[in-house]
Image (cartoon, rainbow, N blue to C red):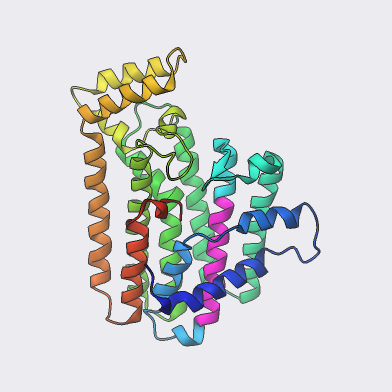
Amino acid sequence: MMGDGMAGELELVEQYLRQFTEDVAGREPLSGILGDVLGAPGKRLRPRLVLACGLLGERFEEKRDRLCRIGALIEMIHSSSLIHDDIIDDSPLRRGKRTIQSKYGKDMAVYTGDYILGKVLYHLMDMGAVHSGMILGSCVQDMCAGELSQHFHRFDSQVSREEYLAAVYGKTASLFRAACTVGALEGGCGRAEQARAGELGEAIGMYFQLRDDVMDFQARDQWDGKPACQDFFRGIYTLPVICALDHPAVGTKMRRFIEESGQGETGEEVLRQRLDHLITEADGICHAKRCMERYKKKAFDLVSQMPEGRGKEELYQGMEICMSDVGGLNG
């Protein structure tokens, strides 16, 4: 777990989250919906990385408040993306609680996500964070492109590993990369250190999403209320499935299975069992885990190259949170 040394900064992030998302006019139902969006705080992985990378620079104490503000804004971008994801996925629950779209309707959820992004833009301009704002603006473009790519390849049994990994980068890893890059920038690091921090964030984000994709094939109801294999049934073919599709002895059987599963004549539980058998035959889960480990090793190698001090220590602890317990998947 993250040491007590970060507790003060994270509490300040929470204060800014409440301040930045508040509708000062007290309009309803907006105020009530925003209260639900904040809810109980999660692990705040992205703000943690902003702060840890900020500690790598020489201006952390001077920029502490500003880094906490930016950490809150990055968390708001993440929250907005989750609201929009739940609309597209028609998800009733997230972290065991009703989603905004489930509780208030899809229209209300769209406007809420857009409202939060508008708040992010306003506060970035108010802070004069031009360079950081450009990085985050580019990141939001990458996030949307990643989601568009994933949606474009739904039910596509010809999707390649390269296309899959590009979508993973866009929809998940790009925000981790931006969090680390902006943290290093605002903390006073030079360009080389900012670039290294960005690579670190990308490696963490890729690992994070790959692990989530692997967990989708396991019993999820114990940790996030979702049944297993939901990505597959929504036509999103992640790395374990792609491995089976590429396997010389399994590929034809997997494509035949995909065609049959789309006909809706077989129950999901039976389909899950057959899917599990095919992926096991192709060694898909093990392959995905090896890919995860490569990103994990890259992340630890990058941190090992960083200067000794509190920033390096906090990065190690933040990575432990990102990469250890199952609950961290929903960070």
Q: Residue furthest top?
A: 265
Residue at image point 46% right, 56% down: 331
Image quarter hosting the N terminus: bottom left
Residue at image point 65% right, 54% down: 36
Residue at image point 42% right, 60% down: 176
* Observer able to see residue 124: no
Q: Is residue 71 above or below residue 307?
A: above
Q: 13 left or right of 107?
A: left
Q: Is residue 28 above or below residue 57?
A: above
Q: How many marks?
A: 0
Type of secondary structure dominating the magenta stretch = helix
Residue at image point 55% right, 80% down: 65
> Percent position (x, y) of residue 233?
44, 27
In magenta segment, residue 87 = no
> Percent position (x, y) of residue 303?
27, 70
Q: Using the rendered view, name the quadrant where residue 70 is placed.
A: bottom right
Which of the two residues, 34 or 39, is positioned nearer the viewer here?
39
> Percent position (x, y) of residue 235?
44, 29
> Percent position (x, y) of residue 135?
49, 64
Which of the two residues, 176 or 146, is positioned nearer the viewer here?
176
Q: Residue furthest left?
A: 249
Q: Using the rendered view, name the quadrant where residue 164 is placed.
A: top left
| Residue range (magenta) | 64-81
* Observer able to see residue 145: yes
